[in-house]
Image (cartoon, rainbow, N blue to C red):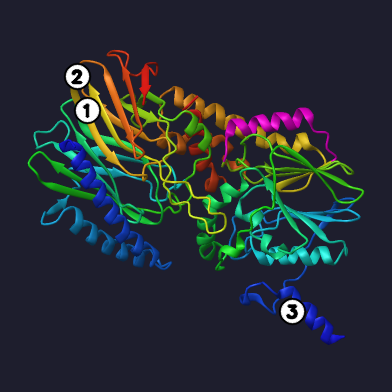
Amino acid sequence: MRRTQWLVCLVMLHGLSSAFAGDAPAPLPVTQVADGVFVHTGAQAEANRDNKGDIANIGFIVGTDCVTVVDTGGSPRIGAALRRAIAARTATPVCYVINTHMHPDHVLGNRAFVNEGTRFVAAAGFDQALAARGASYLDRLPDTIGMDADNSWLVMPDQQVDQKTTLDLGEREIVLEHGPTAHTDNDLTVFDRRTRTLWTGDLLFVDRIPSIDGSITGWLETMDDFAANRIVATVIPGHGPVSNDLAAAMAPQQRYLETVRDDVREAIAEGYSLQHTATHATQTERDRWLLFDDYHPRNITAAYTELEWE
Amino acid sequence: MTARSAACARWQRQLAMGFMVVLAAVFTLPAEADVQRRDQDEAAWKSLRAEHFPDRSIADGEDVITLDAPYRAEDPSVVPITITDERAGTDAPPIRRLWLVIDNNPVPMSARFDFGPAAESATLATRVRVNSYTYMRVIAETADQKLYMVKKYVKASGGCSAPIGRDLDAARENMGQMRLRQIRVGEGDDRRTQLLIRHPNITGLQMDQLTRLVEPAHFVDAINVRKGDALVLDSQMTFSLSANPSLQFNVRDDARGALSVHVHDNKDQQFKQTWPDKQAGLSQSNGTSS
């Protein structure tokens, strides 16, 4: 019996780097937020040596035939811990890993799920965006989370969603939708029809300041679309607590993005430079967000360089 | 081949050689403490100096130019910098030429700006990419052939390897579109001219071993600005400039005639636009591209 466990263990570790061979992570703590929908809530902080890149909300949905994972965390070790959390709850195989966009805190755990039976699914544009930035993501990891990474941490999708597609998990249909450039140019939402649970990926930040890596106007359009067309029982943001009230969860982000857009438009109209605007615009939001100083000036830069072409 | 294009070709050859040397240096740099990094940066500059300014002395330029760059860049692909001409309005020999060097970028010699009779001063602002923690330097040449240098350390990384814009498609579709506005200097009412050019300015460095999705380099490499027949600014640059390049400069109030801009990129595309006199500052004009 012990011999068999050893073999199972060895097989599981096969393909993982020797750095943590023999040191399998404990199952990731997850909460069941709706029937068969499990979420791990990441730390509301920058990726650092304490949280080791565990800063995003990640999880899985269980059907009768298949499990789908939604995002995998900021390192293969977090992905492996998520895999153990799944194994502790169901023997159903992981058929899909969905990436909601290409940012490292959501995708660098992918490698833990590389397996013949698992398909990686992402929006159109994901591969190009990760290809362009992957090397610099990996370069930063020794400084941020204190881990050395290599190219095996970047796992590209097997299946691309151009606009909308449905995955059948067995008595459970999952709808994936890719809209206009918003948080990034490859945002993908995941909707579980049975429980009306919406995973927004980073199209929604709660408490933590949103970061603009796409288009501020596109993001606001996307939120208008959510408000008008989504009837949701449970919303799982990319960062921050799970909620049962989509409108209330979206309101602060909507206010922030609208204020930034309006302030930056005004600064441009009055002839203020990018440099000046980045340090002065929308300071009214300072005390309302976690990590404001880390992201706000960059958000202003992104908004300014977009809106100066209007 | 005209004298100017010969000079341009020579300059680009120099760029290419510098690229090889520094690429090798960059890839052997370990992640080190700031101080060690800075020492190594000085070593990188020594070879650049020997290549671009052999046998010339370079004096401290503190009284000649000021380089304003953020110590920690918010977005490494859009780092706003301002070079202020401290000789403007004085009797000292004026600045004729500026070089911008970003030591640890793949092509450190990032831009060269020549100022003509229609330039009010050699003050210039732009936005650059910064690929790793680096010194940024400006070398000024004055009318009496003297060289002066200032430098600033900038903490940013990933500007060149991760720069495919947030909106690459928009930049491509509207490539060559230009905007001209009068932008405030700081908070006050003083203004200077800002030129914006739609261009993806792709570095060609988005290497990826998994997908082989590499965008070939495509960037603005020359911008010429005239007022009437008189030169304001003639510049050559690399992809160290951010996507949708921005230049701010001062045009003499008494310079007459239309403001015309001629942009060239490394794929030999050309974009031209003209703003009539008195109308400069409005963004409507007749543009052509070829």
Q: Earlier in the sequence, mark 1 or mark 2?
A: 1
Q: Does dot 3 land on a helix, a strand or a loop? A: helix
Q: Residue furthest left?
A: B144
What stretch of residues is rendered in magenta? A214-233
**Residue A70 drawn at (x, y percent):** 75, 52
Q: Is residue B20 left or right of residue B166?
A: left
User: Callout 1, which amino acid?
Assistant: Val
Q: Residues within 10 Å of mark 2 (few under 14, many from 20)?
A: many
Q: Chain of mark 2?
A: B
The residue that disc 1 covers is B232
Residue found 25% across the figure and 43% down from its top: B66
Q: Label 2 near label 1: C-beta < 8 Å?
A: yes
The image quarter containing residue A90 is: bottom right
Inspect this view and state whether residue A291 appears.
no
Q: Label 1 near label 3: C-beta < 8 Å?
A: no
Q: Where A56 falls versus A228 (above or below)? A: below
Q: Are marks 2 and 3 on the same chain?
A: no
**Residue A86 drawn at (x, y percent):** 82, 63
The residue that disc 2 covers is B255
Q: Residues within 10 Å of mark 1 (few under 14, many from 20)?
A: many
Residue found 66% across the figure and 54% down from its top: A106
Q: Chain of mark 3?
A: A
Q: Does dot 1 land on a helix, a strand or a loop? A: strand
Q: Residues within 10 Å of mark 3 (few under 14, many from 20)?
A: few
The overriding secondary structure of the stretch rendered in magenta is helix
Tell me the distance, in whole angstroms, between the alpha carbons under discs 1 and 2. Answer: 9 Å
User: Callout 3, which amino acid?
Assistant: Leu
Tell me the distance, in whole angstroms, between the alpha carbons under discs 3 and 1. Answer: 70 Å
Tell me the distance, in whole angstroms, between the alpha carbons under discs 2 and 3. Answer: 78 Å
Q: Quadrant of the N terminus of chain A?
A: bottom right
**Residue A234 drawn at (x, y percent):** 83, 43
Residue A10's label in the rendered image is 3
